[in-house]
Image (spheres, rainbow, N blue to C red):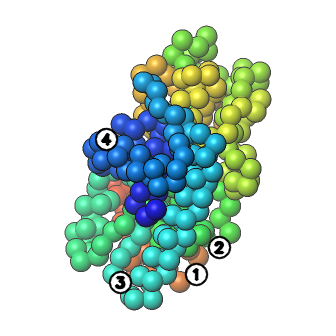
Amino acid sequence: MDLRTLGYFVAVAEELHFRRAAARLHITQPPLSRAVKQLEAELGCVLLRRSPTGVALTPAGVSLYDEARTLLAQAEQARVRVAAAAGTDTLTVGTLADSAEQVGTDLATAYRRQHPDIRIRIREADLTDPTAGLRAGLVDVALTRAPFDVAGLVTHVLRTDPMGVVLRADDVLAGRDSVTTDDLADRRWFRLPEGTDPVWRAFWSGGAEGPVVRTVHECVQQVLWNGTVGLAPSAHALPPGLAWVPLRDKAPSRLVVAWPSTGPSPLVRSFVQLAARTAQLSAGSRNVSVP
């Protein structure tokens, strides 16, 4: 087993669909399918149950998924430490869900213009890590959403978005101008896994406990298939069949840039300042305040 193949398998396991996993990996579907089949042949067991609508993990697949995530995280940590020891001119940016897209392309353009010789690496985290790898030392700076435990970290708010519930479009509440948590008290809400940052986990909780999810895609699928209540900021794009309804008694979601409180490098400081500047300029403000 090599790390690339394990990464392919993890993508399929999280998307539960070969086409979506291939799109996420920026490859075509045939080599992805071949890689997973070769992995199954090497291990001598079936990892995925295929069907016309997608795939499901077998017990062996669930076991490999947990092990593969651990191995990939360890490999990434080793890469970061070796690069740091070698003094490589690289900045690793952690992102959560669509946080990078919410900042827009202006930040990337501005940073490339100011630091043309710096290589940028992007590491996307799932919903179990709101620091997007920052707490674990896997990234230098992160674009993510608050609230979460900020001990040892510094954050700067780039934008604040109202929160709402994500419902099936045919839900009786989908046509409302707004709802409250009391309106949904008897509904099942998705929940994040045990061990997730408690501040972050509490923000996304509400109503009766529903299925455990790790990714935005899993949240969306739970709403579509099971009518589970989802939460999302107003800026989050939704697929057809879903509706976003403002949640009046929910605190807003803050899009933030985060970095370690001790010894941020010049590259990190520059990234933070450019993120703050581009965010405020995109909002139409000329009174730019940067940290």
Q: Residues within 10 Å of mark 2 (few under 14, many from 20)?
A: few
Say which of 63 and 109 sits in front: 63
Q: Tell whether label 1 touches label 2 (CB within 8 Å).
A: yes
Q: Are marks 3 and 1 in contact (CB under 8 Å)?
A: no
Q: Closer to us: mark 3 or mark 2?
A: 3
Q: In the rendered structure, which disc, 3 or 1, sits on the residue that comes first in sequence?
A: 3
Q: Residue at x 76, y 33 (%)?
A: 209
Compared across the picture, whether 127 is left or right of 105 comes to right
Q: Give me the C-alpha separation between circle 3 and circle 1.
A: 20 Å
Badge 2 amino acid: Gly
Q: CA distance from mark 2 to mark 1?
A: 8 Å
What is the C-alpha distance between the residues marked 2 and 4?
Answer: 42 Å
Residue 95 visible in the current orientation: no
Q: Around disc 1, counting alpha carbons within 10 Å, would you say few (fewer than 14), some (14 to 19), or many (20 or more)?
A: few
Q: Where 22 falls versus 50 (above or below)?
A: below
The picture places residue 214, in percent across and down from the top left corner, at 59, 45
Q: Which residue is mark 3?
A: 88
What residue did someone put label 1 on?
A: 262
Q: Which mark is residue 152?
A: 2
Q: Give the residue displayed 33% in from the left and 81% down from the top.
A: 89
Q: Earlier in the sequence, mark 4 or mark 1?
A: 4
Lower sequence index among marks 2 and 1 = 2
Going by the numbered disc 3, the residue's amino acid type is Thr
Say which mark, if any, is on residue 29: 4
Discs 2/4, front: 4
Is label 2 in contact with label 4 (beta carbons under 8 Å)?
no
